[in-house]
Image: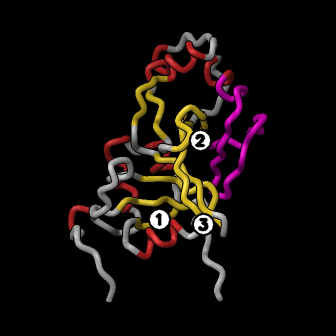
Amino acid sequence: MLKPTSLAEQLLIAMPGLEDGYFSRTVALVCQHDENGAMGLVLNVDSEFTLGTLFDQLDMPCQNPKLRQQTVLAGGPVNPERGFVLHNDSTRWDSSMQLNNGMSISSSRDILNALANGSGPEQFQVLLGYSGWAAGQLEEELADNAWLNAPASTAIVFDAPMAERWQAAAQQIGVDLSLISLQSGHA
């Protein structure tokens, strides 16, 4: 039996027919994927928090009004109280996972302190919660045409406007999601 290809460091792009309340029209970065399942971060769903709210709750002074207004993303429905910082620098924080595409995921307080005081990474997204798939679940969803996958790019993750990330992620592989039928099937 062939070993399944890992989708780690790929983007998952929800197909138009995926009508799950949470994942409809989402783009998620797959952070880990192996025979035990997958973990990812949704990149285009706002949470109810701003960085200012988060910094205040953590007693971290931050005087930068633009930074304080930045929206914290809802990375997924699993453990919505757990925070992650997706960033593009190679600085080693207390708890970081380097991805091969030039991005890192950190989940420690030191990176939040650095962001609050202006010495953190230039490009970053702060997210609460994550998305998880049990062993074989993501593969099944891909076989059911629930997702497209595409290479992760910093242009989509950090630069594309939030409302355009879903379409922009698909367009990088030549897909116009507005032209896709809501019906799916296999030949």
> Is residue 100 shown above or below 1?
above
Which numbered mark, 3 or 1, is in the foreground of this view?
3
User: Residue 60 bears which disc, if any?
Assistant: none
User: Residue 86 bears which disc, if any?
Assistant: 2
Q: Within the magenta stretch, is there residue 102? A: yes
- Crowdedness near tag 3: few (<14), some (14–19) or many (≥20) residues, C-alpha within 10 Å: some
The quarter holding residue 122 reads top right
- Crowdedness near tag 2: few (<14), some (14–19) or many (≥20) residues, C-alpha within 10 Å: many
Q: Mark 2 and mark 1 in contact? Answer it, CB < 8 Å.
A: no
Residue 4 coordinates in the image, percent (x, y): 61, 77
**Distance of mark 3 from mark 1, alpha carbons?**
21 Å
First in sequence, mark 3 or 2: give its number: 2
Left or right of 95: which side holds 56? left
The magenta stretch spans which residues?
Answer: 87-112
Task: Please state which amino acid type lies under the numbered disc 3.
Answer: Ala
First in sequence, mark 3 or 1: give its number: 3
The residue identified by callout 1 is 150
The residue identified by callout 3 is 135
Q: Nearer the viewer, residue 153 or 146?
A: 146
> Is residue 137 shown above or below 124?
below
Task: Please state which amino acid type lies under the numbered disc 2.
Answer: Leu
